[in-house]
């Protein structure tokens, strides 16, 4: 059904993408979803809503939203199915950020494979190691077929693949194809020569230096456009000034990308994590973004590319042309993609992506990464109840709390650090017993916390530095601007891995590291953890998260205390304590304690 201004709010809510967008906007505004479920609001026509809210949302808001909705005719499937088994549903992944894993590039990673193997890791996601001038730590690729000199050689890469496979482990590389470095030869030739075959690989627009082609802003501060005065031309970059967006409309570009992906797969790589892959299809003509949405999301223009008209088409083509011949695995990084659009991207019958990373659980409603606040675990509970209950066996979830783009979750929940180790163990229990594929980020397994940065000089990340500059331009003092950067800077997660701490924890039987090792080994022998049906218990309780994983080969019960006070355990009678984050696992639940029990019988309790 096509939606228009005569449609009602409830029609918008019934549209899969409409519901996602409303929920996202409400989340950013810090408002509850109950607002749109109110029948009076639901019956409002959009034209009335437009009249009522016109001043606040500004011109173009409704057109932008309706334009987005009317490109998506499909809805996620509703009937319950049993998910097909797959290696990547059973595997425990570990993300290696090569710059700070050992500081010794690929040879350093190879030396640590036994450590990862002992931890129980089945597959590694390796952040970019391609040749790059490193404006954004390798996410600005100069040559897809080369290795960054400081990380080693192609021979090292081949050794790494072989060494992983020898241990029965797999390798997932980062695939950054929304943009390349401005030092990639495609961009250099395209800029220098109007008739270059690479000219339409990028978004160029002729014009005057005082009039950028649209009002989009960059994720890393300032405009999303570079002006090249010698050529009187603008070029689009959603990220840093050296990360130029690729134009997927060009069939020749897409063919180059598929060729490159096949080349890596032929080398033995097992799959890819696809960087900001939902941004590859931009709305035709690159129309201005709505200022209200821009303010809310902190970036202007996002609604013009986060779910573009050809996204599904491109993903299907990529899968068919490059992934399928090698039976390769794919996980997409998809910022802004909500529950329903996420299901459309990952349901197996659609042949697009295997998994996606949804980020809505990383901040509570109304907060963004750069806000300094205390994270409430009740939000995490609600996120899982909503997302994991909704899939009906279609698609599969990723379970993660950290990556190279976010401050450490334990520090967000407890900035004082008092409960850091208990929290790290609690997150480990959830990550390894909820339904989905765990992605551990380097340092999670030792309970790594945020870094104690004290000045902007210690911050090296291009994003934080760009946003810091924006704050200064807005009139903030250097101290205030630094304070704003501190909560969200990606440098917290990019600090060098603390190997002395690893060695120490290895010897301590109650350490986070030993706990992770035990949990992962136990998960490998517990089918209910992977394929068991998930049943949440006590859904409304703010203080605890409780659920069962039910499987014919044995079922488990998990309970986690989400707060710093002592609460009663409600483990079912007959449940046997298996493992937990505190030594004994009896009596009341201690602050942030998490326990796993075996249920007495194999059938539903
Ligand atoms: C997402 C990556 O995870 C992040 O590190 C990078 O800066 C941007 N995409 C741009 O590639």
Image (spheres, rainbow, N blue to C red):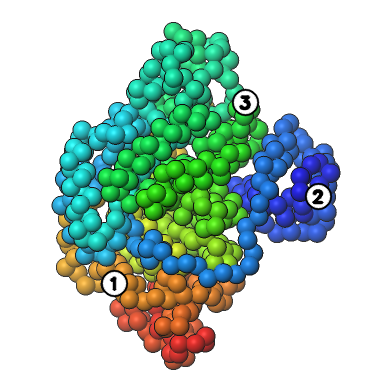
Note whether 340 is above or below 72 in the view shown.
below
Q: Which residue is mark 1?
A: 521
Quadrant of the rendered image containing residue 105: top left
Residue sitting at 46 percent across and 55 percent down? 354
At label 3, counting other C-alpha atoms closer than 10 Å, the crowd grade (few under 14, some 14-19, many 20 or more) is few
Ligand 1 has an atom within 8 Å of the beta carbon of the residue at disc 3: no
Q: How many marks?
A: 3
Q: Nearer the viewer, mark 2 or mark 3?
A: 3
Which one is earlier in the sequence, the residue at label 1 or at label 2? 2
Q: Secondary structure at mark 2?
A: loop
Where's residue 303, x and y in %? 61, 38
Question: How far, Cα to Cα, is label 1 from label 2?
Answer: 52 Å
Q: Is mark 1 within 8 Å of ligand 1?
A: no
Badge 3 marks a residue whose secondary structure is: loop
Contact (CB < 8 A) between labels 3 and 1? no
**Residue 481 in the image: x percent, y percent?**
44, 34
Question: Which residue is denoted by mark 3 in the rendering?
Answer: 285
Q: Which residue is mark 2?
A: 8
Taking the spot 29% from the left edge, 34% from the top edge, the residue there is 145
Please say if 7 is above or below 512: above
Q: Residue furthest front?
A: 325
Decide if residue 389 is in sight here.
no
Q: Is residue 403 above or below residue 185?
A: below
Packing grade of label 2 (10 A; few <14, some 14-19, many >=20) is many
Residue 140 in sight: yes
């Amino acid at each position: 059904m096509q939606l228009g201004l005569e449609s009602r709010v409830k029609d918008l809510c019934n549209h899969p993408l409409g519901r996602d967008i409303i929920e996202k906007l409400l989340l950013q505004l810090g408002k509850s979803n109950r607002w749109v479920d109110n029948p009076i609001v639901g019956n409002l026509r959009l034209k009335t809503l437009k009249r009522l809210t016109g001043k606040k949302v500004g011109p173009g808001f409704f057109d932008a939203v309706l334009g987005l909705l009317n490109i998506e005719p499909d809805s996620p499937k509703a009937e319950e199915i049993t998910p097909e088994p797959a290696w990547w549903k059973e595997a425990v992944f570990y993300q290696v950020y090569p710059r700070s894993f050992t500081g010794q590039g690929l040879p350093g990673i190879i030396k640590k494979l036994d450590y990862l193997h002992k931890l129980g890791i089945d597959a590694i996601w390796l952040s970019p190691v391609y040749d790059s001038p490193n404006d954004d730590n390798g996410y600005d690729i100069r040559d897809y077929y080369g290795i960054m000199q400081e990380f080693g050689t192609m021979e090292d890469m081949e050794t790494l693949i072989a060494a992983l496979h020898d241990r029965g482990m797999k390798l997932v590389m980062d695939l950054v194809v929304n943009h390349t470095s401005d030092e990639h030869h495609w961009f250099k030739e395209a800029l220098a020569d109007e008739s270059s075959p690479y000219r339409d690989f990028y978004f160029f627009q002729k014009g005057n230096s005082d009039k950028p082609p649209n009002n989009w802003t960059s994720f890393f501060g300032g405009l999303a456009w570079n002006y090249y005065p010698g050529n009187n031309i603008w070029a689009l970059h959603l990220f840093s000034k050296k990360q130029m967006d690729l134009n997927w409309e060009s069939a020749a570009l897409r063919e180059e990308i598929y060729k490159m992906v096949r080349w890596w797969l032929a080398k033995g790589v097992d799959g890819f994590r696809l960087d900001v892959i939902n941004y590859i299809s931009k709305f035709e003509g690159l129309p201005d973004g709505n200022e209200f949405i821009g303010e809310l999301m902190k970036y202007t223009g996002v609604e013009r590319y986060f779910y573009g008209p050809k996204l599904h088409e491109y993903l299907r083509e990529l899968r068919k042309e490059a992934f399928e011949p090698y039976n390769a695995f794919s996980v997409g990084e998809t910022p802004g993609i909500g529950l329903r659009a996420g299901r459309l991207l990952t349901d197996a019958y659609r042949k697009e992506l295997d998994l996606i990373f949804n980020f809505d659980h990383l901040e509570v409603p109304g907060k963004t990464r750069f806000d300094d606040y205390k994270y409430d675990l009740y939000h995490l509970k609600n996120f899982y109840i909503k997302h994991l209950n909704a899939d009906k066996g279609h698609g599969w979830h990723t379970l993660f709390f950290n990556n190279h783009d976010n401050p450490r979750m334990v520090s967000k929940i407890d900035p004082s650090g008092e409960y850091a180790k208990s929290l790290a163990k609690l997150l480990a229990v959830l990550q390894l017993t909820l339904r989905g594929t765990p992605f551990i980020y380097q340092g999670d397994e030792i309970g790594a916390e945020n870094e104690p940065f004290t000045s902007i000089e210690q911050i090296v990340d291009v994003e934080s530095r760009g946003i810091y500059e924006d704050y200064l331009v807005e009139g903030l003092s250097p101290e205030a601007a630094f304070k704003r950067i501190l909560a969200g800077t990606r440098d917290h997660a990019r600090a060098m891995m603390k190997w002395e701490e690893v060695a120490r924890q290895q010897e301590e039987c109650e350490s986070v590291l030993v706990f992770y090792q035990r949990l992962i080994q136990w998960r490998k022998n517990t089918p209910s953890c992977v394929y068991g049906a998930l049943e949440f218990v006590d859904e409304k309780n703010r203080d605890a998260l409780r659920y069962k994983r039910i499987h014919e080969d044995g079922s488990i019960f998990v309970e986690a205390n989400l707060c710093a006070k002592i609460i009663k355990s409600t483990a079912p009678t007959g449940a046997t304590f298996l493992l937990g984050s505190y030594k004994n696992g009896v009596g009341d639940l201690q602050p942030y304690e998490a326990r796993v029990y075996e249920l007495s019988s194999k059938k539903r309790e």
